[in-house]
Amino acid sequence: MPECEILVHVRGRDPVADAMRKELAALRKAGESFDARQFFAALEARLGAAEGVRRVLNATGVVLHTNLGRAPLAGPAIAAMTEVARGYCSLEMDLESGRRGDRFGGATALLRELTGCETALVVNNGAAAVLLALSAVASGGEAIVSRGELVEIGGGFRIPEVVAQGGARLVEVGTTNRTRLPDYEHAIGPDARVILRVHPSNYRILGFTEAPEPARLAALARERGLVSVEDLGSGALLDLARVGLPGERGLRQAVADGFDLVAASGDKLLGGPQAGLLLGREDAIARCARHPLMRALRPDKATLAALEATLRLHRDPELALREVPALRMMAEGAESLSRRAQTLLTLLPEAARAEAVAGDSLVGGGALPLARLPTTLVALHPENMTAEELAARLRRSRPPLVARLERGRLLLDPRTLAEGEIGDAARAVAEALA
Ligand SMILES: *Cc1c(COP(=O)(O)O)cnc(C)c1O
């Protein structure tokens, strides 16, 4: 059978033979008849289960779950990505003239329109954007950063180390909780190159705190001939008040405040593919574009296609809210969530001893750690199994279901399950308990 030949070719003889034995044994045990198509589908799934990146059902309620691949993409972004993946594309060709074109032309035009920036660049992720910015404009000099913003974002990305990697010397100013404009002013010496503002990402300092207005900081840098850089992290284009998350600084705000370079992440609050955005002034962006690191950090055609498609949706906030899954999930209302939790509840087997409880979803991705998105959770209390055991079984189901474990309870949040996935989740629980 050709299917079999391909499988052996791609996966290797021994793993395929082993999976076949197991699948046949499972068929025999279930007393089911042999259907070639079903058999090969099951075989693929069984072989897939042993390796690498694959689709999972996210029932954790963490919308931008870094361990689960962050933002699910919008339909148009998936279509654009697939289209260019299948064949060739105009990545670096100007089709008007037939000459070499600008890889970032499409994304730059959209980012200008959407944020008011002079120009832009795209790299592989937010971390790359920050590293490139510092390498290009701070190297050989000093970068001034508030002590309240010397954060670790996760994955070992620590601002003091990134500044060092960028070839700059870190000058800390202020204190953990309070930093004022004169603290920055007094720290500007002959070697100062950059004032860096960093979004606190995954933690907050509350209470007796102070920080200068961002626009004042950008203006100070300009007056003293320094480059102002803001590591915004998330990069919201939509006013997040619309999804019940007020007070988050977006891309447009950072550009309007006058920062020369603004670094942001494509797969956080923008809801696009993993990418890093650098927006800002012509001269500062040109220095980044010329830097040798740029070649090492540039994204591929599929990322750019998906990013451009996501940005196009953001031209219309209503459309973005409806079509960009991460935004739609954040915006889902209490009634809809409660209804979907009830649907899940009715599909679950008796043995799950499930009940609906009030709770919160999280934004995730190191963004808005204190934001609570009220939801209805489905809590499972199986009789003959601990929550941990059930969670482990669910992670082994096909597709794997990742649930939330909290104080000995197993919780399923409908917010991060797509409409068609509620049934899959219920099936996974039924099988895990059988
Ligand atoms: C997330 C984050 C980054 C890194 O972005 P990635 O796209 O995850 O690489 C950088 N800075 C801040 C403040 C962040 O929150």
Image (cartoon, grey):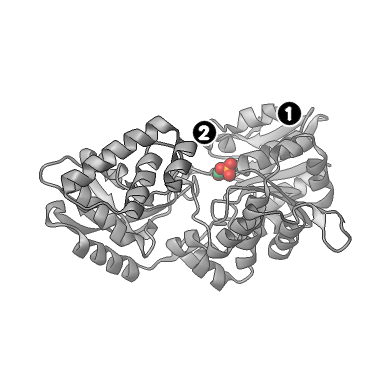
Q: Quadrant of residue 331?
A: bottom left
Label disc, if present, on residue 155 of the rendered structure: 2
Q: Secondary structure at mark 2?
A: loop
Horizontal side of residue 431 vs 243, given as left or right? left
Residue most toward the front?
1
Q: Which residue is mark 1?
A: 168
User: Residue 59's x, y, as percent?
Assistant: 34, 52
- Of 146 and 252, which appears nearest the observer? 252
Q: Quadrant of residue 341?
A: bottom left
Residue most toward the left?
383
Q: Is mark 2 within 8 Å of ligand 1?
A: yes
**Residue appearing at x 72%, y 56% in the figure:** 89
User: Residue 187's x, y, as percent?
Assistant: 73, 33
**Residue appearing at x 21%, y 38% in the figure:** 389
Q: Is residue 11 above or below residue 35?
A: above
What residue type is disc 2 on?
Answer: Gly
What residue type is disc 1 on?
Answer: Ala
The crowd level at tag 2 (other Cα within 10 Å; few <14, some 14-19, many 20+) is few
